[in-house]
């Protein structure tokens, strides 16, 4: 019987996909490969250079001080403003 707990998957039965049966060993190898590829593609982005970080922070500061072009609209990122 298949059991699921979080991201783990355990099955006593071989996986069947389009008539192809995979035993536990091959199924785990595929899962590991998918995990490795996801980790490689989802690596954290490198830190921004200090000069760009300063400019982004300044832009945020100026944005918070500027009036809305739609006075009745609430800002989505500033609750209760």
Image (spheres, rainbow, N blue to C red):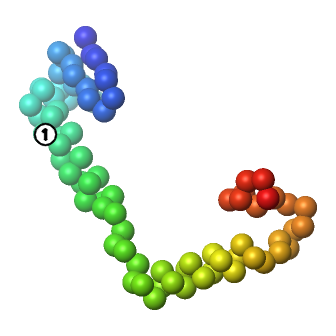
Q: Residue furthest bottom?
A: 51
Q: Is residue 5 left or right of residue 31?
A: right
Residue 19 visible in the picture: no
Q: Which residue is located at x 68 percent, y 59 percent?
A: 77
Residue 24 visible in the picture: yes
Q: Quadrant of the N terminus?
A: top left
Q: Is residue 2 left or right of residue 14?
A: right
Residue 70 percent location from the top left of the image: 87, 68
Dot 1: what SS?
Answer: helix
36 or 60: nearer the eye? 60
8 or 14: nearer the eye? 8
Q: Which residue is located at x 17 percent, y 15 percent?
A: 12
Q: Which of the 4 image quarters holds residue 75?
A: bottom right
Q: Residue furthest top?
A: 1
Q: Residue furthest left?
A: 25
Q: Is residue 44 left or right of residue 15?
A: right
Q: Which residue is mark 1?
A: 29
Q: Quadrant of the C terminus?
A: bottom right
Q: Which residue is located at x 34 percent, y 63 percent?
A: 44
Q: Which of the 4 image quarters holds residue 69?
A: bottom right
58 or 31: nearer the eye? 58
Residue 40 percent location from the top left of the image: 25, 59
Q: How many marks?
A: 1
Residue 75 drawn above or below residue 36:
below
Residue 56 percent location from the top left of the image: 55, 80
Q: Which of the 4 image quarters holds residue 47?
A: bottom left
28 or 74: nearer the eye? 74
Q: Which residue is located at x 39 percent, y 84 percent?
A: 49
| Disc 1: CA contacts within 10 A as few (<14), some (14-19) or many (>=20) | few
Residue 30 percent location from the top left of the image: 18, 40
């Amino acid at each position: 019987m298949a059991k699921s707990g979080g991201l783990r998957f355990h099955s006593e039965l071989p996986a069947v996909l389009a008539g192809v049966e995979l035993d536990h060993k091959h199924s785990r190898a595929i899962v590991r490969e998918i995990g490795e590829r996801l980790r490689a593609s989802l690596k954290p982005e490198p830190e921004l250079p200090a000069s760009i970080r300063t400019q982004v922070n300044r832009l945020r500061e100026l944005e918070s001080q500027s009036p809305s072009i739609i006075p009745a609209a609430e800002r989505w990122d500033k609750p209760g403003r």
